[in-house]
Image: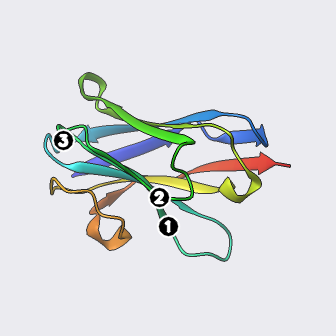
Amino acid sequence: QVQLVESGGGLVQAGGSLRLSCAASGRTFSSGAIGWFRQAPGKEREFVAGITWNGGSTYYADSVKGRFTISRDNAKNTVYLQMASLKSDDTAVYYCAARGGTSVYSIARQYNYWGQGTQVTVSS
């Protein structure tokens, strides 16, 4: 079993920055992928970014490419999502998710474990 806990969400003005953290505990997937997803009210959950746990390969949705950066600290079992140049469209609950496979997928059902989510609100 893997437990994921997100933190770092909050209220920020448009153009501002936030850093989200995803701390993993329990059974750790040393070679597994981690993804960040988000869900806005009335919308489906969408892929934001992903990273392979040991390889360091990263992937981004087109809507955040160049503004968001995903990274990981294996010693702390933590994955980060640095968000910059935030827009009102970025407002959503952000979730981190883990899977045992090495590949990053943009499809939510490919992930086995999910955190509880952290709210990000961008005011215009």
Residue 94 location, x and y as percent? 54, 53
Which amino acid, mark 1? Glu
Residue, disc 3: 28
* Nearest to N terminus: mark 3 or mark 2: 3
Q: Residues within 10 Å of mark 2 (few under 14, many from 20)?
A: some
| Marker disc for residue 61 | 2
Which label's residue is closer to the chain start, 3 or 1? 3
Identity, as a three-letter code, of the amino acid under mark 2: Ala
Rendered location of residue 22, percent (x, y): 42, 39
Task: Find residue 57 and report its horizontal and vertical position in percent.
Answer: 26, 43
The reply to whether discs 3 and 1 touch (Cβ–Cβ < 8 Å) is: no
Q: For the view shown, which residue lies furthest in the right direction?
A: 124
Identity of the residue drawn at 17% across and 37% down: 54
Residue depicted at 14% across the width and 40% down the height? 30
37 to 79, vertically: above or below: below
State the residue in front, 110 or 124.
Answer: 124
Decide if residue 103 is on the left or right side of residue 84: left
Residue linked to disc 1: 46
Instruction: From this view, report whether residue 93 is shown above or below residue 109.
Output: above
N-terminal-most mark, 2 or 1: 1
| Quarter of image, res 113 | bottom left
Residue at 55 percent of width and 51 percent of height: 64
Q: Secondary structure at mark 2?
A: loop
Residue 113 vs residue 120: left or right? left
Q: CA distance from mark 2 to mark 1?
A: 9 Å
